[in-house]
Amino acid sequence: MNGPGLLPPGARLPGGALGERYVVKAPLGHGGMAAVYLVDDTVLGVERAAKVLAPDLVQDPSIRARFLDEARAMARLDHRNVVRVYDVLDAAAVGPVLVMEYCAGGTVRRWLGPGPLPLEHVVLVGRHVLAGLHAAHAAGIVHRDVKPGNFLVHRDGVVKVSDFGIARLAGISSSSLTRTGEFLGTVVYAAPEQRMDARSVGPAADVYGVGAALYQLASGREPPDLSVASLKLSVLDVVPAPLRPFLLTACAYRPEERFPSAAAAAAALRQIAG
C-alpha cells in the first residue's frame, strides 16, 4: 500500500519519557486525513495500531483539535466493542499520533465479497456495534460516522467500533469544528437530520447508521435513502425478510420513531437471531 507521506517500515515514533517506543511495521490503511500503521510497542512487546495525521494537515489547528477530540472520545470508553486507546503522542516529525488496539481482522467492509453476508453474520455485527455505541451514548458521545469501514474485527471475532474522529462529545466544545449546516459523516449512512445539520444530532442518528450499514452487509449493495423505505417497501426486497422490520424502525425518517436506544435496537436484533 503506497501513498504520499506514508512512513516507511522501521520508522520510529516517540513515546514521551519512554523514548522511541513504537516502531512502524507496515501501513494498514490511509485516507485523505490520516494514515494508520501497524506498529511494535517495544516496551510491552505487543502490536498496536497508530493513527497519524496526513502531513499537509499537521499544521491545521482545527484538524489537530478534532484529532485530539477523537482521542478524548475513545479514551472515555472501556468496552469490548470499542477500539481501545493506549497512548496519545505529539511527535515533532509527524504531529499527533493516536496509539490504539490492533484488530487483526481488519474492517467488516473487507468481508464483503461478490455477494452479501449470511444473515447470522449481519445480526452478529449489528449486535456488537450497537453494544459499543450504547456505551458511547451512555458516556455522552455520538459517533456520527457509523459505517462498515469503521467496524473492526479483533482476532477473537469480536467486532469493535473505531474512528471517533467526528464524534460529538458532551461537555467538550466543538463549535469551531462543526458549523450550523455543515455535513459530517458519510452521506449514504447518514440520518436525514444529520444531512441537514450534524451539530445537534443525537444517538438516534447512530442507530440509523447501523441500519444503513446492515442493509449493505445483508444486500451487498450501497444503501439508498432508507428513511423513505416505509413509503417504498421495494427498496428492502434485497435484504432477508427477517431483517426488514428492523431496518424500517432503525432508519425511520423521524428520530423519535426509531429504536429509543442502541440497546433497544440490539434487543430487536436478538429476536431476529432467535
Image (cartoon, rainbow, N blue to C red):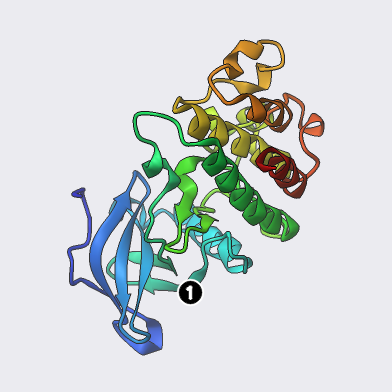
Residue 98 horizontal/vertical position (percent): 43, 66
Residue at left 55%, top 38%? 184
- In this view, the residue in front, 169 or 257, is 257
Residue at left 18%, top 66%? 9
Quadrant (top left/top right/bottom left/bottom right) for the C terminus: top right
Residue 204 horizontal/vertical position (percent): 72, 39
- In this view, the residue in front, 129 or 28, is 129
Residue at left 66%, top 29%? 242
Query: Is 233 situated left or right of 224 in this image?
Result: right
Which residue is situated farthest in the front direction here? Answer: 274
Residue 246 horizontal/vertical position (percent): 70, 31
Is residue 69 visible from the viewing direction of this image? yes
At mark 1, the secondary structure is strand
Image quarter of residue 171: bottom right
In the image, is residue 85 above or below residue 243? below
Residue 127 horizontal/vertical position (percent): 63, 48
Query: Is 135 situated left or right of 100 in this image?
Result: right
Amino acid type, label 1: Tyr
Query: Is 65 situated left or right of 97 in this image?
Result: right
Say which residue label 1 marks. 86
Using a 10 Å C-alpha cutoff, classify the residue at mark 1 as few (fewer than 14 neighbours), some (14 to 19) or many (20 or more): some
Query: Is 22 situated left or right of 68 in this image?
Result: left
Image quarter of residue 200: top right
Residue at left 81%, top 41%? 260
